[in-house]
Amino acid sequence: MNKFIILMLAIGSQAHAAGTLSAKDIMTKNEDARKVSDFEGASRLTTGSDTDKTGKTKDFTTYRKIQADGVHNSTMTRFHAPAEVRDEGILIIENPNGKNDVLLYLPNFKKIRRVESTQQSGSFMGSVFSYSDVATPHVEDYDYKELRTEKCPTTEAAKVMCHVIESTPANNDVRDRTGYSRAVSWVRDDNSMGVAADYYGLDNQLLKHLEANQVKMIDTQNKKWMAHSVRMNNFKTKEFTLMTFTDVHANKGIPDSTFTQQNLQKVK
């Protein structure tokens, strides 16, 4: 074969290899696509079951901001309704060691309770979501393998191809905090946003399924996205929770003082 042709084939093969994203690359793009400097939004949890389709709601405001390291987030949630949870607050400070700080303020007792790492797989305000579900996943916390590509499994993204990525905790701290042995996620090829995920318990049995819809761009300048409707089903308890966001505003310049114990205890 002509040496020039051989050389061109070799270059073409290398270029193809360089253009193929690894599973970690795909999840890095996913994290980048949903990374905004900060946002504030009105939020609602609706929790029901197979026998209670209507469910019960809790309304709250979410504040989130990227920390100085440019990776991890601080999240404050302040509940407004119903009356029995009014003014309750939860502060989540993500840490690079995989152990997040979760502080719960109970105004009736005028005290802050720390949710230990081993308890963060427990229910977030009586919902199917856990404290670790509400915190954001980060690339360095997991090892990845791409299982396949296929059409995305949600109606909203039915015409889009998805990468199906298996994530396993990178260490025992992440495993214990989340309560999951692994997760399988469907990540859109066009905007790198996740639209669905299966979560497996520590017994490696399918425990929860997540579906994300109303994926909207909340930062048009930097092309950052957010799902405004996220539903989680628990196959063990037969319960579901729908978390919705409205009136979302990004890049508000939320001050760091929002994410402090002093502010957590401050009730208007």
Image (spheres, rainbow, N blue to C red):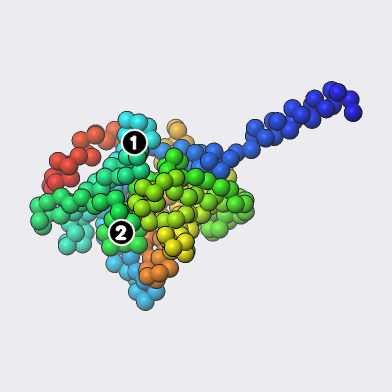
Q: Secondary structure at mark 1?
A: strand
Give 133 or 255, whichever is nearer the viewer.
133
Q: Residue at x 90, y 28 (%)?
A: 1
Judge whether residue 225 can be spotted in this image: no
| Residue count near mark 2 (Cα–Cα under 10 Å), binned few <14, some 14–19, many ≥20 | many
| Residue 207 place in picture, x, y as percent | 43, 63
Give 110 or 53, whichever is nearer the viewer.
110
User: Of the residues under marks 1 and 2, which one precedes in the sequence?
Assistant: 1
Q: Secondary structure at mark 2?
A: loop
- 1 or 2: mark nearer the eye: 2
Residue matched to label 1: 66
Indicate left or right for 65 with 84 as reference.
Answer: right
Q: Residue at x 21, y 59 (%)?
A: 81
- Image quadrant assignment for residue 50: bottom left
| Residue 247 place in picture, x, y as percent | 33, 47
Amino acid identity at mark 2: Gly
| Residue count near mark 1 (Cα–Cα under 10 Å), binned few <14, some 14–19, many ≥20 | some
Q: Residue at x 28, y 56 (%)?
A: 119
Residue matched to label 2: 122
Judge whether residue 91 can be spotted in this image: yes
